[in-house]
Image (cartoon, rainbow, N blue to C red):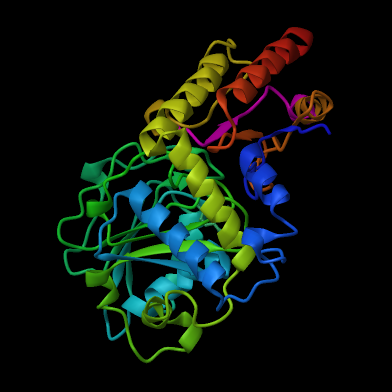
Amino acid sequence: MKRVINFNAGPAAIPLEVLEQAQSELLDWKGTGMSVMEVSHRSKEYEEMHNHAIAQFKELAGMGEDWKILFLTGGASTQFLMLPMNMLGEGKGADYLVTGHWSKAAVKEAKRFGPLNLTSVEGEGGSFTRIPKQAELKLDPKAAYVHMTSNNTIFGSQWQYWPEVGKVPLVCDMSSDVFSRPFPADKFSMLYAGAQKNLGPSGVTVVAIKDSFLAQAKEDLPTMMSYKIHAENNSLYNTPPCFSIYILDLTLAWIKKMGGLKAMEKINDEKAKILYDAIDASGGFFKGPVEKESRSKMNVVFRLPSLELEEAFVKDAKAAGIIGVKGHRSTGGIRFSIYNANLVENVKKSVDFMKEFQKKNG
Ligand code: PMP
């Protein structure tokens, strides 16, 4: 067996221990004589695991009794519309902090449900190389919520502070940096994340919502779009993505074993530093477009002097067992997605490869 160094942006690397445990219990899960994919979602065994995943998520996030954790389908993209569908209407609007491709996608859906007040540091087609400063945020104190995207997966920028938004509920799309660092849960009313980067496989989206915010959700909605119905049914109104939730549960246990969010942050800081130091020390051969204080510690994005060199870089990386480094199709360039499951060793090996590549081609 040969495992590659996997810098895919999502679906992405999953801790080897998690995969090994899933493999070892694939045919007979918890003595049921079935795989977890074959058990009923109404069984005692399934429900125990489902609730264990919820409890672990809350514990790691430091969320108390006043939070509901939902496991939904349709990806983070479905939250782009569920959130405004549940919370806007009758003239109620929201603030959106637009910092990249995915927050623009969130705006596109929310516009259908109410008036939006946008803060953006870039115009249409901008390259989003920085996060706005607190003083630049144009906030409406009457907004139903403020929506932000904590990490910009494509442009490689990340909020390195949590914005002050007064009494307005703060909602965060944490898809690409959830549980990569501690965060003050108290500051938020809702967060959501597709699991396929830091929390396991695709297929499940975690939505954490505070009871006080949930209480503001509309009642008269199509059933599967209603936060209240999913919350009342503990995400078991219909068949949940059982296997994805199972791997999520194992991944959360792995994060706990690693030492929790503080420990993940320490490792992630170290990885990002190794990579950015290598970029900055390359004399301009590798160039990161994002302003230093907005650099992402999850998606490290950089350019090489020519498109030909970028193509050769991707090809040579693959030959060296390093995959997933091609930048998003909309931006080009190179992107290393160094989510939780990629440990320091992988990043060190990759920096050795970068140095070698520069020596040969610089
Ligand atoms: N938000 C962010 C920050 C993302 O990175 C992505 C996917 N890469 C999405 C939303 C969309 O997620 P999904 O594919 O689960 O709908």
Above-or-below relation of 83 to 277: below
The spot of residue 297 in percent (x, y) is: 47, 33
Q: Nearer the viewer, residue 79 or 331?
A: 79
Q: Name the quadrant of the C terminus.
A: top right
In the displayed structure, does residue 168 sit left or right of residue 126?
Answer: left
In the displayed structure, does residue 299 sit left or right of residue 320?
Answer: left
Above-or-below relation of 234 to 266: below
> Can residue 144 be seen in this snapshot?
no
Q: Which residues are magenta?
A: 295-311
| Residue 347 occupies quadrant | top right
Instruction: Examine the structure image and report whether residue 267 is included in the region drawn in magenta.
Output: no
Quadrant of the picture in which ligand 1 is shown: bottom right
| Residue 147 occupies quadrant | bottom left
Q: Nearer the viewer, residue 199 or 298?
A: 199
Q: Residue at x 47, y 30 (%)?
A: 268
The spot of residue 84 in percent (x, y) is: 38, 74
Q: Nearer the viewer, residue 186 or 162?
A: 186
Q: Residue at x 67, y 41 (%)?
A: 8
In the displayed structure, does residue 19 sit left or right of residue 254?
Answer: right
Instruction: Examine the structure image and report whether residue 307 is included in the region drawn in magenta.
Output: yes
The spot of residue 246 in percent (x, y) is: 58, 59
Residue lying at the far front of the rendered structure: 31
Q: Name the quadrant of the N terminus.
A: top right
> Can residue 69 be seen in this snapshot?
yes
* Total numbered labels placed on residues in the image: 0
